[in-house]
Amino acid sequence: MQTREQRLLIIDDDEMFCHVLNRALTRRGYDVIVAHDAEQALTMAAQHSPTMATLDLKLENSSGLKLLPELLATVPQCRIVVLTGYSSIATAVEAIKLGAVNYLCKPVDADDVLTAFERQSGDPDIELADNPPSINRITWEHIQKVLQEHDGNISATARALGMHRRTLQRKLQKRPVRR
């Protein structure tokens, strides 16, 4: 059981996910606070000074990557794990560069989140993939990289990729392609 001094902020616009994760972490002894958007997250962080936070990469009206440095400026001692259902190598690298301690692909449970906070260093023994990523996965990764370079601006990204904006929007609405 964890002591109540461990305060964890969950930042996610999926209310059901927040409810389930909140319950599981509270049962494990964590003092949990929930925010559903960037503004609320910054307010809660300033008021409660969490020691840990989970941050959804794709919030309804903002990017978790843009919120990450603001959170760390507000609460520098906070350890942040980025969670996403839209994973890509580009966003994982940027999240770590911006100060996240880990990056997890949804779906995750409380055990996954706590393990991510506990890991202090990389694992050189991690299993390497036998097969290279599919062309669809490489396309997804490239779109995510270009989208990140254009600060999430879909029109600018579509122009840079030489595709119609609506085509890009349809591709982005789909779940990421599995490896």
Image (spheres, rainbow, N blue to C red):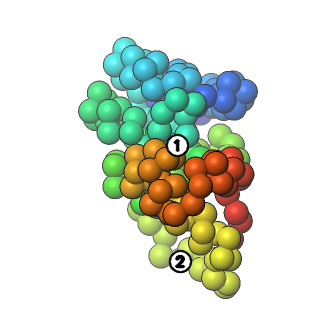
Residue 66 shown left or right of residue 113 in the figure: left
Find residue 35 and report its horizontal and vertical position in percent: 53, 22
The residue beneath circle 2 is 125
With respect to residue 102, does 59 lie above or below? Answer: above
Relative to the observer, which residue lies in front, 26 or 64?
64
Amino acid type of the residue that numbered disc 1 sits on in the rendered structure: Leu
Q: Marks 1/2: CA distance?
A: 27 Å
Name the residue located 50 percent from the left edge and 63 percent from the top edge: 161
Residue furthest out toward the bottom: 130
The residue beneath circle 1 is 57
With respect to residue 86, does 26 lie above or below? Answer: above
Quadrant in which the N terminus appears: top right
Name the residue located 65 percent from the left edge and 40 percent from the top edge: 110
Which SS class for mark 1?
loop
Name the residue located 52 percent from the left edge and 43 percent from the top edge: 57
Relative to the observer, which residue lies in front, 14 or 161?
161
